[in-house]
Image: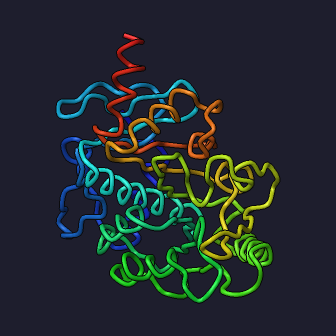
C-alpha cells in the first residue's frame, strides 16, 4: 500500500532534521545507516498513519486495540500507564513532525502532571527549535504549577528553548489574565487562527480536564473565548474553554489510565455528549482517548460485551 501524504511529510521532516526513519515490524522505527532513529515505538500499542476510526483487529496482550466509539472519537488501548505515557510521547513526535513539515512550526497546549512528564521521552528524538508550548490551565501568580512542571519535567530535560514556553500571565485578575493569554495565543504565528496543532489533556476520576470541573461555570461556558478566568481556594487561575479552544484544535489526545478512572471512562465513552463530564465533551477534528487495560475494563465489560 502506498504511503499517505501525511506519512511522506513526516518522513521528509525527519530527513530535513537530520534523522532517518525506517519502519520495521509493527510500525517500529529501526536505525538506518545514518544511525539516528526519529520515531521509536516504545509501547504495546501499534501506531498507524491515516486512522479512519474503524475498529482495529484485536492484538495479543490487550483486549482491544484502537477501538472506535460510536461518535467521532477514537480510543487507543494500552497495556499499562507507562505504555500510555509512551503513546503520548509518540503522538507528540508524530504531530510535531507533521506540523513542522507543513508549516515550519508546531504549537501544543499541555496540562500538568503525568501527561507532561511523559514528554521527557521525546528527548533526543526530535528538534525542538520551532516547537511552541502553551498551557491549557495554570495559576495566575508567582507560583505556576503547570509552567514549573513543564520546565522541570519536559523543557529543560529535552532542551526546549525557554523562550518557546509561553506561560500564563503572572499578575492581574483571573479575567484579565485569561484575556491577555488568549491574545498571546491568537497573535502567535505557530497557532493558526487560534487552533493548536495538538492539545494534550489529562483527566481526573470525576471527568475533569484542564481546569474544567463537572458543574462548574467554566465547563458550562459556550462562548468563543479561548480562555476564561476562575477564582477559587487556590487563587486566580486561567483555563482553556471547550468550545473556544479544546474543540477547535487540530488534534486532541485525552489520557485516562488506572483503575480509579474506569467508571469515568465508561461514562465518558458510552454517554458521549449526554455525559456531564467535561472530558466527555471534548470533540473536534481528531480526538483520541488513550486508556490502559485497567481504565478500559468497565467499558469493555459493560459496553463491548453487550454489543457482541
Vertical position of residue 194 compared to residue 141: above or below: above
- Taking the image as shown, residue 88 lies to the left or right of residue 209, namely left
Q: Residue furthest front?
A: 233
- The figure's colour scheme reads rainbow
**In the rendered view of the protein, which quadrant contains the C terminus?**
top left
Residue 280 sits above or below residue 13 on the image:
above
Q: Position of residue 236 (x, y in %)?
A: 68, 75
Compare residues 107 and 206 and report the one nearer the observer: 206
Q: Position of residue 119 (x, y in %)?
A: 37, 67
Residue 235 appears at what percent x and percent y? 65, 76
The answer to which image quadrant residue 35 occupies is bottom left
The quadrant holding residue 38 is bottom left
Q: Nearer the viewer, residue 158 or 262?
A: 262
Residue under the image location 29 percent in, 39 percent down: 294
Residue 41, above or below 176: above
> In the picture, which quadrant includes the N terminus?
top left
Residue 79's place in the image compared with 249, above or below, is: above
Viewed as shown, does residue 146 lie left or right of 307? Answer: right
Q: Residue at x 43, y 60 (%)?
A: 92
Report the number of numbered marks.
0
Q: Position of residue 91 (x, y in %)?
A: 41, 54
Q: Residue at x 61, y 52 (%)?
A: 213
Q: Residue furthest right?
A: 223
Q: Looking at the image, which is closer to me, 219 or 247?
A: 219
Seen at 57% across and 59% down, the residue is: 210
Amino acid at each position: 500500500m502506498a504511503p499517505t501524504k501525511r506519512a511522506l511529510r513526516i518522513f521528509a521532516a525527519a530527513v530535513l532534521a537530520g534523522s532517518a526513519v525506517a519502519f520495521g515490524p509493527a510500525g517500529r522505527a529501526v536505525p538506518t545507516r545514518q544511525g539516528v532513529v526519529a520515531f521509536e515505538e516504545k509501547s504495546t500499542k501499534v501506531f498507524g498513519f491515516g486512522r479512519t476510526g474503524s475498529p482495529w483487529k484485536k492484538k495479543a496482550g490487550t483486549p482491544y486495540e484502537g477501538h472506535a466509539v460510536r461518535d467521532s472519537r477514537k480510543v487507543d488501548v494500552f497495556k499499562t500507564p507507562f505504555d500510555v505515557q509512551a503513546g503520548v510521547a509518540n503522538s507528540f513526535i508524530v504531530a510535531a513532525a507533521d506540523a513542522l513539515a507543513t508549516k515550519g512550526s508546531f504549537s501544543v497546549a499541555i496540562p500538568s502532571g503525568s501527561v507532561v512528564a511523559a514528554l521527557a521521552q521525546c528527548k533526543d528524538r526530535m528538534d525542538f527549535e520551532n516547537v511552541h508550548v502553551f498551557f491549557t490551565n495554570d495559576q495566575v501568580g508567582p507560583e505556576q504549577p503547570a509552567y514549573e512542571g513543564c520546565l522541570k519535567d519536559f523543557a529543560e530535560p529535552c532542551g526546549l528553548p525557554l523562550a518557546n514556553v509561553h506561560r500564563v500571565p503572572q499578575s492581574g485578575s483571573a479575567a484579565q489574565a485569561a484575556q491577555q493569554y488568549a491574545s498571546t495565543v491568537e497573535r502567535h504565528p505557530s497557532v493558526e487562527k487560534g487552533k493548536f496543532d495538538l492539545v494534550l489533556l489529562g483527566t481526573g476520576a470525576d471527568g475533569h480536564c484542564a481546569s474544567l470541573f463537572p458543574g462548574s461555570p467554566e465547563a458550562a461556558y459556550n462562548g468563543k473565548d479561548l480562555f476564561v478566568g476562575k477564582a477559587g481556594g487556590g487563587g486566580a487561575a486561567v483555563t482553556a474553554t471547550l468550545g473556544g479552544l479544546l474543540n477547535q484544535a487540530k488534534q486532541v489526545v485525552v489520557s485516562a489510565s488506572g483503575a480509579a478512572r474506569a467508571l469515568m471512562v465508561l461514562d465518558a465513552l458510552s454517554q458521549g455528549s449526554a455525559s456531564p463530564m467535561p472530558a466527555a465533551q471534548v470533540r473536534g477534528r481528531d480526538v483520541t482517548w488513550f486508556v490502559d487495560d485497567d481504565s478500559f475494563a468497565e467499558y469493555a465489560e459493560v459496553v463491548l460485551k453487550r454489543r457482541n
